[in-house]
Image (tube, rainbow, N blue to C red):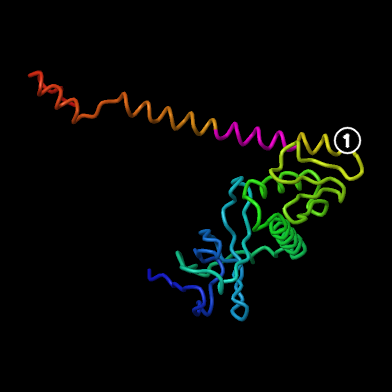
Amino acid sequence: MAAATATAGNAVNDCFNIGSTVMCTTCFNEEVEGEVLAFDHNTKMLILKCRSKTTEELSDIYALNLSLCSNVQVIKECNGNFVDDPQKLNLEQVKMRLRKTVERRQDYLKSQNADVSSEAQELYRAIAKQYGYNEVSWQGLNIQILNEVTISPPYRVDNVVSSSNNETSCNYIKRIIKQFFNSRLSGAQDSASNAAASTSSASVSPTSSSLSSSNAASGSPVPAN
């Protein structure tokens, strides 16, 4: 079957039949495949029901703007034999999930600071998860929490200062910082240990070619594989 394809910015199919299987690549380079629930040609909005990534009992619903998608393909055309109409979407739930997605993206953007390291930005997000993104902000190179506690570079426990001498908040933030850097150190040590183990294994495991050369030099027969 010839697949209908389109790239971002180009025209897409005039219509996708309900029940057909469509696959496309989103602007986030995520490949999505699912059953067509609805399609609006004017807005290029395609609704797909996809297999859930967490449980087989549920499905994930994707609302896709095909103007921002690429490699749109009709994997399987529907024959049109439907017994029941597709289940109606809970628009309020869709709006709520969209709002939460936008909020998460806005929160992530708040943690961005071009003048600091990626490590500092990760620490910012770790603190914001505990206090909420509305209570954490960048003040130049400093991280400010609750408008009273400031963490200055290099963002260690010794760099935590409270303008109101709030020891309780300072101690809690210091614990977050300690846990953050300890977890990063532990992850780095695990990676180094795995790399060392792989190198050690490669160095003690002779290759078939080295075995052949050694046996040939000693006049010994080469063992059959």
Quadrant containing the C terminus is: top left
Is 166 situated left or right of 80 in this image? right
Name the residue tied to disc 1: 168
* Residue at the left extreme, as displayed: 219
Which amino acid lies under the numbered mark 1 shown in the image of this protein?
Answer: Thr
The residue at 75%/46% (across/down) is 152
Residue 165 x/y as whole percent: 91, 39
Q: With respect to residue 87, does 55 lie above or below?
A: above
Q: Position of residue 46 (x, y in %)?
A: 59, 70
Q: Position of residue 201 (x, y in %)?
A: 36, 26
Other-residue count near label 1 (Cα within 10 Å), few / some / many at <14 / 14–19 / ≥20: few
In-front residue for pair 56/157: 157
**Which image quarter holds the N terminus?**
bottom left
Give the residues drawn in magenta, as a range: 176-188
Q: Residue at x 80, y 50 (%)?
A: 144
Q: In the rendered view, tell whether residue 220 sits above or below residue 210.
A: above
Which SS does the magenta portion mostly show?
helix
Q: Is residue 196 left or right of residue 211?
A: right
Residue at screen point 79% across, 39% down: 173
Please provide percent x and percent y for residue 176. 75, 37
In front: 30, or 153? 153
Residue that appears at 63% across and 46% down: 119
Is residue 143 positioned above or below 93 on the image? above
Q: Confirm whether the magenta stretch covers residue 177.
A: yes
Q: Is 142 contained in the magenta span?
A: no
Q: Secondary structure at mark 1?
A: helix
